[in-house]
Image: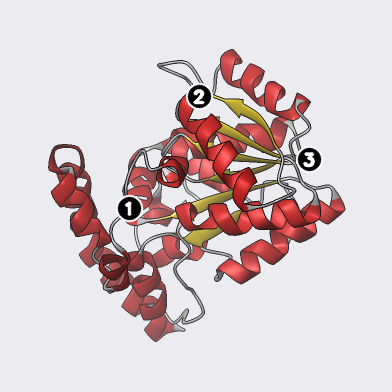
Amino acid sequence: MEGAAVRRDGQFGRDGEALAGAGVLRLVDVPTRAALLADMAAHWERGEGFAVATLNLDHIVKLRRDARFRKAYAAQSHVVADGNPVVWLAHLAGRREVELVPGSELIEPVAAMAARMGVPMAFLGSTEPVLRAAAERLEARHPGLKVVACVAPPMGFDPESATADALLDEVAASGARICLLALGAPKQEVLAARGVQRHPCLGFLSIGAGLDFVVGHQTRAPLWVRRIAMEWLWRMLTNPRRLAKRYFDCAVVLPGLVIAARKERDAG
């Protein structure tokens, strides 16, 4: 893979027509967790930065509506499939090698790899108590890991502001080589795109609520629920007010993506 340079400029039309069908699934350019970890390690060894996004149906909905989000995705150096529907659609389109790689499940293996390679880590997002608690737990679990910065942005944080630049500079000044972004979409992807341009030797991994899971501030669905691909239903039932509209929007785009994936498979 290439380094941290923007590799997807021009892939999306100004009105987002390239996202109208299965073409959006081609954003997944790293099919497996093993491949992602290996390439992240190679970037560290070369002193290069990167930006990792985790594509799910909610992101696809946002990509169709938000030009800023499309631009941010264009700047990601690595995109994995975070969500069973994205994996199933990729398989339907003929990409059988694509596997599920949730961002929250990357935290532990990335921390272990950073500890082994002596790569300092930073956290940006969430709240300071959550970040500090996550740092303590991960350092305890992975001897040798150093979390050198825990940066909680202010309320109403704009990832394209001067404040964002100051926070990115604070992370870079700490000596961190990788920064976990716990801001949610689209803020974390927008900030990752800005960060890798501002500090080309720094890696960014967008993880959403992953650190809240680490400290128990939020709870993931039980393992058996995840194994039967029903985590989305568990999440909606536990927080219907916040998630019902999101999942409705995802359901609306799914039939068109299925049709387009089948066409792509047949054409290939």
- The picture places residue 229, in percent across and down from the top left corner, at 28, 69
Is 50 placed left or right of 157 in the picture? right
The residue labelled by disc 1 is 220
Q: Earlier in the sequence, mark 2 or mark 1?
A: 2
- The picture places residue 132, in percent across and down from the top left corner, at 55, 30
- SS class, disc 1: loop
Image color mode? secondary structure
Count of marks overlaid on the render: 3
Nearer the observer: mark 1 or 3; the answer is: 1
How crowded pointer 2 is (Cα within 10 Å; few <14, some 14-19, many 20+) is rated as some
The residue labelled by disc 3 is 201
Residue shown at 41%/73% (left/top)? Answer: 90
Residue shown at 67%/46% (left/top)? Answer: 6
Res 170 → quadrant? top right
Q: In this view, does 262 lie above or below 156?
A: below
- SS class, disc 3: loop
- The picture places residue 266, in percent across and down from the top left corner, at 38, 85
Instruction: Give the Cα separation between the discs numbered 2 and 1.
Output: 21 Å
Mark 2 touching mark 1, by CB under 8 A? no
Amino acid type, callout 3: Cys
Q: Which of marks 3 and 2 is nearer the N terminus?
A: 2
Is 226 placed left or right of 131 in the picture? left
Is 100 placed left or right of 250 in the picture? right
Q: In this view, does 25 lie above or below 129?
A: below
Residue shown at 23%/65% (left/top)? Answer: 230
- SS class, disc 2: helix
Res 193 → quadrant? top right
